[in-house]
Image (spheres, rainbow, N blue to C red):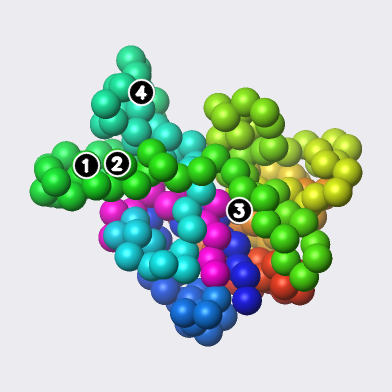
């Protein structure tokens, strides 16, 4: 089976609960569409878990990019302030002060090689996996957001995205967040990185589009 999750944001407990719920096995494949780190406190353990799993594939999210911009070799000006404003303090402290230097560089190298997007075909159906929204611009792939009434981004593929909590697309701020299906787009960010009692972690099985929540 082929699964997708997004925006774990340091919540390793929910992640492990989801793996148990879907009975994830070595024969399955999991695509994680960005933002494993930040906000929650278990982002680095989550990264280690994914790095060690041959059947888990991480796509780059804007939070992984902010980490690279701050701690990577290019070190973009102002990146640490932006990262901190977006919940990166726990990850920064863990990598800089608690992670051995050799392991820190291994994690940064791993993040640097994560793709911005992937096309996958499951049971003859084509999907485009990307953190924010499909775009020819790598930066926009991390930061763009879907619009509820926008036309489909592709004529022949369904885009699977995260990044935007689905309540901002549905306008429902009183119910538990649910996967949103638009015109050729499916958003699976159900607010796992939020402290709201309405937040959930969602998992989409691409084989049959069944949805799981924890």
Closer to the chain start, of discs 1 and 3, is 1
**Element carrying mark 3:** loop
Residues shaded magenta: 29-45
Whether residue 125 is in magenta: the answer is no
First in residue order: circle 4 vs circle 2: 4
Q: Position of residue 136 (x, y in %)?
A: 67, 28
Residue 46 is at least partly visible in this image: no
Query: Label 4, label 2: how many angstroms apart (C-alpha)?
Result: 15 Å
Q: Nearer the viewer, residue 137 or 145?
A: 137
Whole-angstrom CA distance, mark 1 to mark 3, is 29 Å
| Disc sitting over residue 105 in the figure | 1
Relative side of 142 to 187, left or right = left
Q: Dot 1 lies on which element? A: helix
Residue 115 percent coordinates (x, y): 51, 43
Q: Residues within 10 Å of mark 4 (few under 14, many from 20)?
A: some
In the rendered image, which residue does mark 2 sit on? 108
Q: Is the Cβ of the residue at disc 1 closer than 8 Å to that at disc 2?
A: yes
Residue 98 in the figure: left or right of residue 166: left
Q: Badge 3: few (under 14), some or many (20 or more) residues near its Cα, within 10 Å? A: many
Residue furthest top as drawn? 77
- Res. 78 image quadrant: top left
Mark carried by residue 79: 4
Instruction: Compare marks 3 and 2 and give the one earlier in the sequence.
Output: 2
């Amino acid at each position: 089976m082929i699964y997708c999750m997004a925006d774990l944001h340091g919540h390793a407990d929910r992640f492990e609960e989801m793996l148990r719920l879907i009975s994830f096995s070595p024969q399955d494949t999991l695509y994680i569409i960005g933002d494993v780190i930040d906000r929650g406190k278990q982002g680095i353990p989550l990264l280690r878990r994914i790095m060690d799993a041959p059947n888990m594939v991480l796509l780059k999210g804007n939070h992984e990019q902010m980490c690279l911009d701050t701690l990577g070799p290019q070190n973009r000006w102002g990146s640490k302030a932006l990262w901190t404003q977006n919940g990166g303090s726990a990850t920064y402290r863990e990598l800089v002060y608690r992670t051995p230097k050799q392991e820190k560089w291994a994690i940064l190298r791993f993040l640097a090689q994560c793709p911005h997007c992937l096309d996958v075909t499951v049971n003859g159906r084509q999907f485009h996996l990307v953190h924010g929204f499909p775009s020819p611009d790598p930066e926009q792939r991390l930061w763009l957001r879907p619009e509820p009434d926008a036309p489909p981004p592709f004529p022949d593929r369904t885009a699977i995205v995260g990044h935007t909590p689905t309540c901002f697309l549905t306008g429902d701020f009183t119910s538990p967040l649910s996967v949103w299906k638009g015109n050729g787009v499916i958003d699976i960010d159900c607010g796992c990185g939020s402290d709201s009692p309405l937040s959930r972690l969602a998992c989409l099985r691409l084989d049959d589009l069944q949805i799981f929540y924890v």
